[in-house]
Amino acid sequence: MYVCVCKGITDQHIREEIEAGARHLKDIVNRLNLARDCAQCVEAAREIFDSAYQSFQDALCVDAMAPNPAAA
Ligand code: FES
């Protein structure tokens, strides 16, 4: 789904940037030039970023709580 039509940025691009180290919406803005034209996309981008970042953190917690086979 397109989030920023002006720059052709999708929700998948935002998820990929989080995987690559983005930790704040401003990281996405700086890396992809999100919202640098009309800025109509800011609120949608913020909602998608927050949701995707929460999912990313939840996945990290699940991984951290998984049994360590090397310790068995
Ligand atoms: S839709 Fe993102 S800058 Fe226009």
Image (spheres, helix red, strand yellow):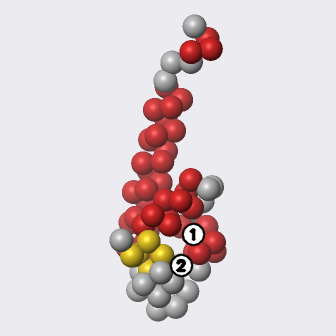
User: Total marks drawn?
Assistant: 2
Q: Residue 21, image x and y in percent?
A: 63, 55
Q: Amino acid at mark 2?
A: Leu
How many C-alpha atoms fall within 10 Å of the one at disc 2: few (<14), some, or many (≥20)? many
Q: Helix, strand or loop at disc 2? A: loop
- Quadrant (top left, top right, bottom left, bottom right) of the C terminus: top right
Count neighbours of disc 1 (C-alpha within 10 A) and say few if under 14, some if 14 to 19, many if 20 or more: many
Q: Quadrant of residue 42?
A: bottom left
| Residue in the picture at 51% in, 18% down | 67
Judge from the rendering whether residue 63 lies leftward or rightward of residue 11; answer left or right. right
Instruction: Determine whether 32 is above or below 19 in the image.
Output: below
Q: Nearer the viewer, residue 50 or 56?
A: 56
**Residue pointed to by mark 2:** 34
The residue at which mark 1 appears reads as 28
Q: Quarter of the image containing the N terminus?
A: bottom left
Q: Is residue 39 visible?
A: no
| Mark 2 and mark 1 residues within 8 Å of each other at the beta carbon | yes
> Residue at 46% of width from left, 40% of height from top?
59
The residue at 42%/48% (across/down) is 55
Q: Do we see residue 61 in this rendering?
A: yes
Task: Tell me residue 9's x, y (percent).
Answer: 48, 76
Q: Measured from the top left, where is residue 71 in percent x and y?
A: 61, 11
Mark 2 vs ligand 1: CB under 8 Å? yes
- Tell me which amino acid carries mark 1: Ile
Ligand 1 lies under 8 Å from the Cβ of mark 1: no
Extreme residue toward the top, this view: 72
Task: Classify mark 1: helix, strand or loop.
Answer: helix
Q: Is residue 51 above or below residue 14?
A: above
Q: Which mark is residue 69?
A: none
